[in-house]
Image (cartoon, rainbow, N blue to C red):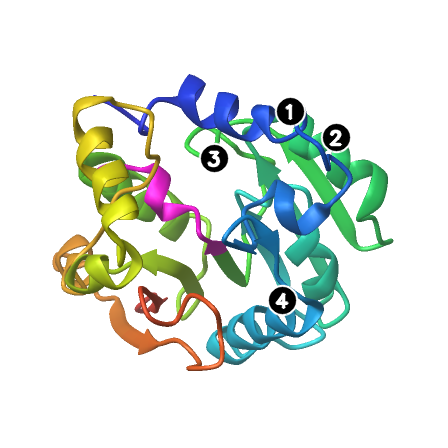
Amino acid sequence: MVICVVKSEVTSYYRSRFRASHPDDLYWQVGKTVNGKSVDAGQLQLIVDAIKIGLGLTSTDAVLDVGCGNGLLTREIAGSVRSVDGIELTPELCEVATRNCLADNIRYFQGDVLTFDVGVVYDKIYLYEVIQHFNLNAAKQLIERLLTLLPPNGKLFVGGVLDEERKWHFFDTEERRFYYFESILSPGKNIGHWCHRDVFKWLCKNSSCRVTVFQQNIELYTSHYRFDVLIEKGV
């Protein structure tokens, strides 16, 4: 079974961002950009708000940030909860997180989320713009794995999902469409799996989970081609 697009391709993609002209830009490192330019702090706040509201975060929550990258979101979420653990596959990003995005209630771990286990049951879990790195089989395995780390009534927020039905809202120029067509013949060139909104209901069809799909805030720079999902574990 293929677990990710290819793990080496994912890590190579993010490693390459450290070798370019602005390696200290935390937004740019994790793809918070429009046309190659980093978005502003207001955009990050919209993402943070979506996670907080979606999960209903409280000061007593123990939270897991899956694919935490360089800790950009982790640091923001930490101020609203009891603790946050971040798990990241790419060593360089994890190193940046431990250096630049620390707080007393944050722990970072470098490794594969599918085998990650520190013996903790989390109240709530989120992953943001991460599910795109997993094909359908792997996404199913990932969701099932994360649900085992939640108690009854625990919540899982899957943010920034690439919307299959609105793919051409992103590939909205001839140049972008040509890149997409070429990427089909060149695996690894265009990292990202696009999902239909019903995929998550299908992934959870044999469980007692409740699945809700959300349209992103229209002011968010990705709202025209991404959506968010909340999975609530049953009793």
Q: Nearer the viewer, mark 2 or mark 3?
A: 2
User: According to the image, label 3 marks what residue?
Assistant: 113
Looking at the image, do the residues carrying marks 1 and 2 touch, with CB atoms under 8 Å apart? yes
Instruction: Give the residues drawn in magenta, as a range.
Output: 127-135
Relative depth, front residue between 40 and 163 = 40
Q: Nearer the viewer, mark 1 or mark 4?
A: 4
What's the distance in space between the residues labelled 2 and 4, CA to CA? 21 Å
What's the distance in space between the residues labelled 3 and 4, CA to CA? 24 Å
Where residue 183 sits: x, y (%)? Answer: 24, 30
Question: Which amino acid type is shown beneath numbered disc 4?
Answer: Leu
Question: Which amino acid type is shown beneath numbered disc 1?
Answer: Pro
User: According to the image, label 2 marks what residue?
Assistant: 95
Looking at the image, do the residues carrying marks 2 and 3 touch, with CB atoms under 8 Å apart? no
Where residue 175 sits: x, y (%)? Answer: 29, 45
Question: Mark 4 Cα within 10 Å, few/some/many (few <14, many 20+)?
Answer: some
Where residue 64 sits: x, y (%)? Answer: 57, 52
Lateral position of residue 149 relative to residue 60, left or right = left
First in residue order: circle 2 vs circle 4:
4
User: According to the image, label 1 marks what residue?
Assistant: 91
Question: Which amino acid type is shown beneath numbered disc 2?
Answer: Glu
First in residue order: circle 3 vs circle 4:
4
What's the distance in space between the residues labelled 1 and 4, CA to CA? 23 Å
**Which quadrant holds residue 136?**
top left
The C terminus is located in which quarter? bottom left
Is 109 within the magenta? no
What's the distance in space between the residues labelled 1 and 2, CA to CA? 6 Å
In this rendering, is residue 142 above or below 204? above
Question: Which residue is pictured at 42% across the width and 65% down the height?
Answer: 222
Question: Which amino acid type is shown beneath numbered disc 3?
Answer: Val
**Which quadrant holds residue 30?**
top right
Question: Which residue is pictured at 33% across the width and 78% down the height?
Answer: 215
* Dot 4: element: helix
